[in-house]
């Protein structure tokens, strides 16, 4: 990783802006919310964009037309939290422990040609962990999902 002090609000907003046309094409409302202060974390900008993009891409893919995806940034003294929340199909409780496994697909009806190859979430998790952070999931089948990437703001917070 090429770690650099990065404004996480600007980084996340750039991901949001890049996905707006895709969301509009699918008729999914994509919105961006953030704290009113810049929050900085020591990250590899390109890898962080890749991980967040995987989350937004999945959220749009699994949210039907007329649905909503919210990408947000929050901050604590020690961590930056980037959440991607949707009101899409959701993930059954029994599938949740496996969603970060390579090649695992929740929607068994999708092939690798129509629904991707099943590595986006495993990459997002690996990238969060490479930044000494983590990724969490909250989901209810039929109601939607929230994936949250939590990364330390400073190297001294990495192992806490």
Image (cartoon, rainbow, N blue to C red):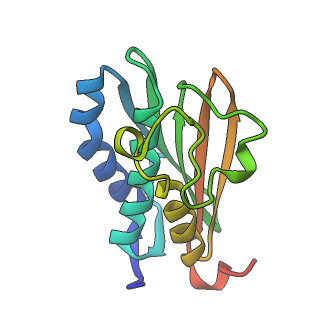
Give the residue displayed 21% in from the left and 34% down from the top.
21
Residue 136, percent from left and from top: 67, 52
- Residue 1, how many percent across, how many down? 42, 84
Furthest residue to the top? 66
Q: Where, by quadrant of the figure, is residue 134 drawn?
A: bottom right
Q: Is residue 148 left or right of residue 160?
A: left
Q: Residue at x 63, y 50 (%)?
A: 99
Nearest the viewer among 111 and 22 is: 111
Residue 91 vertical placement versus 123 (above, below)? above
User: Residue 58's image quarter?
Assistant: top left
What residue do we see at 62% from left, 57% from top?
Answer: 100
Tell me the residue at 67%/46% (across/down): 137
Specify the quadrant that holds the C terminus: bottom right
Figure check: 67 above or below 91: above
In the image: residue 33, left or right of residue 95:
left
Q: Indicate left or right for 17 with 141 as reference.
A: left
Marks counted in the figure total 0
Question: Picture coordinates of residue 86 (x, y %)?
Answer: 52, 31
> Is 140 placed left or right of 83 in the picture?
right
Please tell me whether residue 52 is drawn above or below residue 89 in the rendered image: below
The percent coordinates of residue 101 (x first, y second) are 62, 59
* Residue closest to the eye, 27 or 117: 117
* Residue 157, image quadrant: bottom right
């Amino acid at each position: 990783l090429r770690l650099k002090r990065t404004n996480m609000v600007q980084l996340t907003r750039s991901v949001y802006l890049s996905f707006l046309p895709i969301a509009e094409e699918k008729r999914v409302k994509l919105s961006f919310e953030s704290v009113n202060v810049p929050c900085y974390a020591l990250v590899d900008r390109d890898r962080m964009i890749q991980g967040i993009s995987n989350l937004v891409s999945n959220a749009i893919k699994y949210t039907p037309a007329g649905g909503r995806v919210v990408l947000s940034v929050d901050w604590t003294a020690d961590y930056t939290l980037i959440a991607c929340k949707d009101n899409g199909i959701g993930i059954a409780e029994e599938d949740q422990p496996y969603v970060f496994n390579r090649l695992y697909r929740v929607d068994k009806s999708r092939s690798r040609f129509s629904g991707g190859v099943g590595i986006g979430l495993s990459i997002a998790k690996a990238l969060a962990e490479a930044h000494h952070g983590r990724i969490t999931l909250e989901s209810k089948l039929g109601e939607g999902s929230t994936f949250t990437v939590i990364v330390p703001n400073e190297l001294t917070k990495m192992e806490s």
